[in-house]
Amino acid sequence: MADRPTSSTSTVRSLALIAVVVVALVAAFAYTAGWLSPGRLTPVKIVNALAPPGGAALGFRRNHAKGICFTGSFESNGAAASVSSAPMLAAGAYPVTGRFNLATPDPKAVDATVRVRGLSLRIVAPVGSEWRTAMISAPFFPVATPQAFYGLLKASANKSDPDAMKQFVAAHPEVAHFGAWAGSAPWTASYAQERYNSLNSFIFTNASGEQHAVRWSFVPAAQPEPVPHDQLQARDPDFLAADIAKRVHDAPQRWTLVVTIANPGDPTADPSQAWPEDRRKVEAGTLVVSTIEPEADGPCRDLNFDPTVLPPGMHVSDDPFPAARSAAYAVSFDRRTAEDKDYPRHPAGGSTP
């Protein structure tokens, strides 16, 4: 009987400890969701801001919603092993699953209306490590920070204030630089003719422990052929998927991986600033796209191309975007997988791109 008070006290303490842990977990969850700091930028806010006026397309990615899958290989020549010990940069061939896409939240967008095109890749090494990357055709990003990107989304969606975008651009002059590129750069009629750029900076570490800040691009073997925009507008709304399917059916399509190495002082935290063209470059190998598959039943459909999934020999830099993208991609992935019943899948083999 003498030990009952002690047991009772112990039970109360245990329950109190559990309560504290639960409260802490709830608080952490609330903080992550932004409930305790309404002004803080969260991945949920970014993903919500990406939605078009009519709402998100259920079951689809919240951005780059329109795309097509492919498989192929990355044929490394071993040249980049001098700057990174990543296993897929050693000489050899490595399987690739990827996706060509358009930078739009609308999976039914007319191809000629979307200025920026994308390439996403998952490259797997025999030891099990993998490299995921999502790149775009623009040579630099429209804004310098994730907070500015959110501001851009909000300003572009603000129909009640006709000066919202004008005021945002005045505060972020890099947007005008991007606008100049978007208005003057030539259009092509093929995913195969695009150069795709990482824009974000990463750190490569070689076998000796030497580190280099890098960006990379996939440069097409196909010669870019400029097409007047009004001619593209007269084409089928889905001409890009049809074109890449035909090209790959006729012959594998190729891109050269070019790794660009920063000089000391180059802006590594700001993807809106391009590095000078004279920076050291390493041609690391060739991406070979050998099979195109409709996305609905394709191998890229349920892949999250998280740019922070990196192999040994690569890691993130001081650039804040990869972490922000990773968090937003996770929210998008969770939402679209929860909406699987709303995704318009096709019977296997029942459709062609």
Image (tube, grey):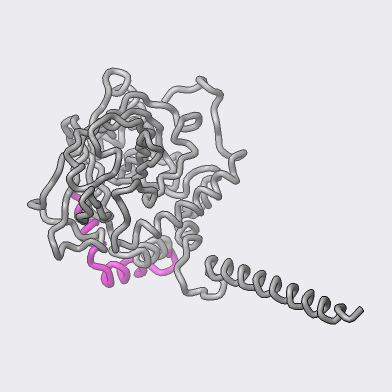
- Looking at the picture, tell me which residue is in the foreground, 303 or 80: 80
Pinpoint residue 210: horizontal percent, then vertical percent.
20, 55
Could you tell me which quadrant the N terminus lies in?
A: bottom right
Give the quarter of the image for residue 76: top left
Left/right placement of residue 23 relative to residue 233 reads: right
User: Where does the image place residue 288, in percent across and percent down from the top left?
Assistant: 27, 28
Tell me the residue at 81%/80% (across/down): 6
Give residue 109's position: percent from left, percent from top. 41, 41
Q: Residue 173 magenta-drawn?
A: yes
Name of the residue lying farthest toward the front? 2
Q: Is residue 228 visible?
A: no
- One can see residue 41 in this view: yes
Secondary structure mostly seen in magenta is: helix
Asked if residue 10 is among those painted magenta in the image, a careful observer would answer no
Between 50 and 311, the residue placed more toward the observer is: 311
Tell me what residue is drawn at x 29 percent, y 49 percent.
Answer: 313
As drawn, 167 above or below 198? below
Residue 135 horizontal side relative to residue 24, left or right: left
Q: Residue furthest top?
A: 250
Residue 143 lies in quadrant: bottom left
Where 179 sits versus 121, above or below?
below
Count of all numbered marks drawn on residues in the image: 0
First to last magenta residue range: 158-184
Q: Nearer the viewer, residue 325 or 171?
A: 325
Quadrant for the C terminus, please. top left
